[in-house]
Amino acid sequence: MVNVIGLGYIGLPTALMLAAHGVEVVGTDYNPSLVDTLRSGRTTFQEEGLEELFAQAVAAGITFTTEYCVTDTYIVSVPTPYDPDSKKIDPKYVVSAVSTVLGICPKGATVVVESTVSPGTMDKFLRPLLAQFGREDVQLAHAPERIIPGNMLYELRCNNRTIGADSPEVAARIRDIYASFCQGEIVLTDIRTAEMTKVVENTFRDINIAYANELAKICRADGMDVYEIIRIANKHPRVNILQPGPGVGGHCISVDPWFLVGDYPGLANIILAARKINDSMPEFVLERVHSIMRELGMKDVSRVGFYGLTYKENVDDVRSSPTLQMLESMERHLCGDLVQVYDPYITYDMVANQHHSLDSFLEAVDLVVLLVGHDEIRQNMHRLSGKVILDTRNICSLPGTYKL
């Protein structure tokens, strides 16, 4: 039996996928409300195919609890934030989870950490726990996830995986568990290499996005079309520049590079510069809004509308959302509760002046800032005709549309 600890955006799909493919699974989360929701037969977030997978897993016998189980294999998938001051990982959640496991697990158990961690976290924070609890018989492994909201289930099945362990035997046993559903290549290595590889992958994307965002600023300063420039540059066979946008959100790309900045001060210089560029984009978008309003003589901020609250299209995940960052910045300047906001995926009241239909949102605004490229707005772009539009995602082709 596998006890999956943490049933959030990563732990729940992993637990369901394992159960649906024949592995006996118990899912554990400290949040009683979340566990009650799952026990009642409902999922806790929106994701294509998740409800169908949930039904398969329940039929296969998955159970949910707030208690840790006595078994031989644990998969820990809890948050790993970073300290905003030191920029180092804050390991408190993973340390707490592993400590609880060590208090109950049988001799020879294996604890697999799926949570993304900074290089050396297992050695610095988790391995000492084995000595502290007198559990040197317990094996540690690291199997970082590689999935993205909006395409989780496909990527769980098809993406390659990395498993880091202290011995080939432990790595092979964990590989066999993931191979129950993973169709991609499963690479076996040591723990520290697995830790570093995952952080490097997300940092690479952050740097690429930062390059695109810096190009957007350069092109804006000199009246050039950054999207056309990137389109042409990407025709080179060895160039693949990503698209600029209003910022970087989510719990991976906006967080993991800070681990390297915090752990390797003075060495992670390009990484630090990229983080600063991407973190500056919400303010850059606000400056574009103000510039457009001045140009058009618009003075009523309450007629400005932000379309999109999530950090990416077609998900309900708002972690580190650029829109929320913009609203926080505006609140500091005493105008954060004036703009209108709408997102079809956020059905509960999250911010001031939040609308729950596209109709009411469009009726309330004259200037629409497109911050997320949900399918809904792509399919209804014609309804923005007559509005002033600032398109931060390059999805609108209506005449007169302003771009980043």
Image (spheres, grey):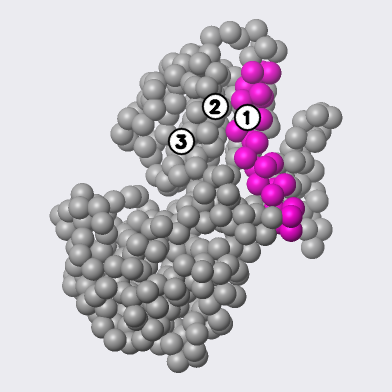
* Callout in the foreground (3, 2): 2
Front-most of 235 and 30?
A: 30
Residue at the disc numbered 3: 309
Mark 2 touches mark 1? (CB < 8 Å): yes
Residue 283's label in the rendered image is 1
Tell me the quarter of the image containing the N terminus: bottom left
Q: Residue 50, how many percent across, how many down?
A: 33, 58
Q: Residue 156, how many percent across, how many down?
A: 44, 68
> For the magenta stretch, what is the residue range?
266-292
Mark 3 touches mark 1? (CB < 8 Å): no
Q: Main secondary structure of the magenta part?
A: helix
Which residue does the image show at 42% across and 46% down from the upper left? 317
Mark 3 touches mark 2? (CB < 8 Å): no
Query: Which secondary structure, mark 3?
Result: loop
* Callout in the foreground (3, 1): 1
Mark 3 to mark 2 CA distance (whole Å): 15 Å
Asked if the magenta segment contains residue 290, the reply would be yes
Q: Is residue 331 above or below residue 99?
A: above
Tell me the quarter of the image containing the C terminus: top right
Q: Give the class, few, some or many, for how many residues have Cα within 10 Å of label 2's Cα (few <14, many ≥20).
A: some
Q: Amino acid at mark 2?
A: Ser
- The earlier-in-sequence mark between 3 and 2 is 3
- The earlier-in-sequence mark between 3 and 1 is 1
Residue 33 seen in this snapshot: yes
Q: Amino acid at mark 3?
A: Leu
Determine which quarter of the picture holds residue 126.
bottom left
